[in-house]
Image: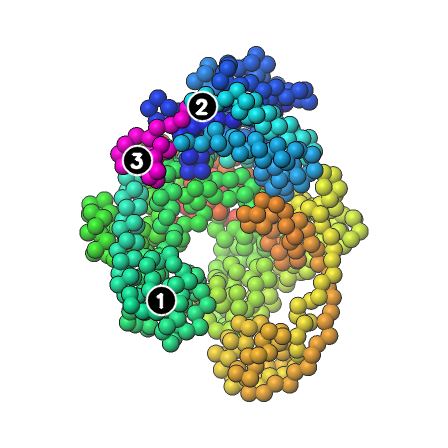
Amino acid sequence: MRHIFFDFETRSGGNIANLGPQGYAEWQDGEFSTEIMCFAWAVDDGPVMVQDCFEDSSLPNVLLQAAKSEHYVFHAHNAEFEYHIWNEVGTKLGWPAMEVDKWTCTAGKAAYFSLPRSLKNAGATLDIGTDAKKDLEGNALMKLLAVRKVTSEWEAYETNGQLSLFGKPVKYDYSTPSAEDRKKLCEYCRQDVVAERAVDRKLPEWNDWERQIWRLTTRINANGLPLALEAAEKGDKLRKQVESDANRELQKLTKGGEFPVKSLGQDEQLRQYLRTHAALSDLENIRKETLDKIDPAEIGGDVGRVLELRKKAGLTSVSKLTAMRKRASRDKRARCCAVYYGAQATGRFAGRAIQPQNFPRGGMSVDEIAEFRDRLDTTSTLKLSRDMGPDAMVALSSSLRSFIESPEGSLLVSDYSAIEVRVLAWLAGETEVLDALVSGRDLYKIMASKIYGVAYEDVTKAQRQVGKMAVLGCGYGMSDVPFVDQCSNMGIEISIREARKVVRAYRQAHPAIRQMWSECGEQSIRVVETGESTNVGMVAFSYEDTYLPAFRITLPSGRSLRYLHPEVIEQTAPWTVGYQGVIEFDGSDGVLDNLARIGVKFDEPDGRYLHKVFVPPKAMKWMDRLVVKTQLELMEPKKVKTIQFKGMVGNNPQLQNKRLYGPLIAQNITQAVARDLLCNSMLNLEEYGFHLIGHVHDEIIAERSEGDWLHDLPTFERVMKQTPKWAEGCPIAVEGFEAVRYAK
């Protein structure tokens, strides 16, 4: 196989951040459309060639032959962009169309090998020696020539990729750049090809199965999520109306006070206003998780109403309606919404634009959502805002999924039931869980019976719900305080005392999973220290030093997770920095909750006494307020070994120091295996002929045409249930539904 390394530089009136690669390539406004300014290419290790399309936009013969030949593959960085520009813009110039199977992506490959996705930062991490100054200059010039120019001082309104200034068309600057600017742009394009080829050459061969997953992702992105666009646009107008009404009421309520607030977005001013109420005087922030624990009705008065406005009218999730409007193509589909290998620790996908992965669960039933959607379709936004007030925002947030709607036919939606629970038990060899899954017994009731010491048949609905939270939440070492918070987020209120009982019961009931945590931690340190390979159950741990030093975990599928520049370091164990001893308290759950919140660790309470207490230094100032008496002595700090490595942190484009420990390694392995099962099913479903349009976490979405009797829900589920050879014995189960509108 021969290789073409390729790069485009384009210009357009479309906004690629809003439209995505495909929408940007398809953009057109009257006589104006997306254009290719230049392109560069290299064949294998040959010289990099550049073509200025202002002079000649024809396709050189070598590229024409390569596009038609099965013996060539095209490489590009973020190749989804090049693929769509070639097929949407290049074909208008007489170029032959190419299927996505002709393309491969160096950004996807870089992510697979745990590098930053950006070409600049991947190259810097690999030390390929690009000229950073020229890169910055060329990037600035590219952006100057590529972006639209709005010929007005007023902000343009955009929908479906089209701009308008209060009904007046926007003028675009499509003049020919100067010869000097074109020369610099071509050099920048040439350097991109040099860099992407260097990155590709420096890295090991990309797993062919993973390359197919990248191509599958590009095809699914191209199919797009169908939108009820008119309804989404009206919902967006309703959002703006409710926000406007809420801000006016907010100004009226806070006017004349010490902290007047003009809008819901003034976080600090709003926090200071709320703190004027005695019950909120210690309010540290106004994040959603904080305000969710406060009932506006209990606060009452103007402050209670302001709090209610912030909680309801201040919901940020409804801004996804704006993202839908901006992302929609002419055929009312949101495309390019999934990112291959977006989560590098596991290989799971990330979201772009409307990000259905982040849609809130909401509190409305399917019928209530349908009723609201009917009202939205038949009632003016002004009347809806007046009738519903800030509750309209709650309804919009709960209804977001429903705006993904099949125009002609239906959606098939199916997900793996408790997939991480099943995969973790399979990997760890937790036989009791595996036997229960095979027999069809309710795992949540089994767990609840152990927590509360009651017979399986006598478990109540409330107890089962706590058992469910334990099974779903405690598999990766969760402790009492996070468990209380997780339950609270789901509307379940439990005390620290009960949470400790839950965590203890889970760990006692799952010895193999606890052993997996321990082995992952111990063996990872041993491998990094000695360089010797070993197995932990079904996965292999090894140390490699190829493109960069890495701690490598090989999964049952054959795919590998890599942690770059690993080193074993000694750090002071945080649980040894503080005081230990005995505490006497009033015996109440409230004090236990407060002690746990400030980091105090303790054994099971013995009446009014807590033994084997650990108190961190920062908590000592609270002891006189919370407890009756203390008998504490300063501890001697101890050192423990842990792994430090370089990895991606949030949106930071460069690698940062991170830590690895046993339960986290077990979590990464489990989620990675679940991801591989999902990918295997998507490939099988596509091969069977299903029209895949998206996937969310462990859920797959397909679109079914009206009258298509072959691709029905039972067949969809049957194909999903088929496990690959490497996952034999993993007790997966799927559950789905068919509907016109997407739902949870």
**Residue for badge 3:** 165
Q: Quadrant of residue 211?
A: top right
Residue 687 is one of the magenta-drawn residues: no
Q: Residue visible at 68% across and 81% down?
A: 633
Amino acid at dot 3: Leu
Q: Give residue 81's position: percent from left, percent from top.
A: 50, 30
Amino acid at dot 1: Phe
Return the residue nearer the eye: 265 or 583: 265
| Secondary element at tag 3 | strand
Q: Residue visible at 59% across and 59% down?
A: 476
Q: Using the rendered image of the protein, determine whether residue 249 is visible from the camera's viewpoint.
A: yes
Q: Earlier in the sequence, mark 3 or mark 2?
A: 2
| Secondary element at tag 2 | strand
- Position of 295 with respect to 479 (left or right) is left
Q: Quadrant of residue 256?
A: bottom left
Q: Is residue 519 above or below residue 151?
A: below
Amino acid at dot 2: Glu
- Position of 435 with respect to 707 (left or right) is right
Q: Is residue 440 above or below residue 26?
A: below
Q: Is residue 578 above or below residue 163?
A: below
**Residue for badge 1:** 259
**Residue for badge 2:** 35
Badge number at residue 497: none
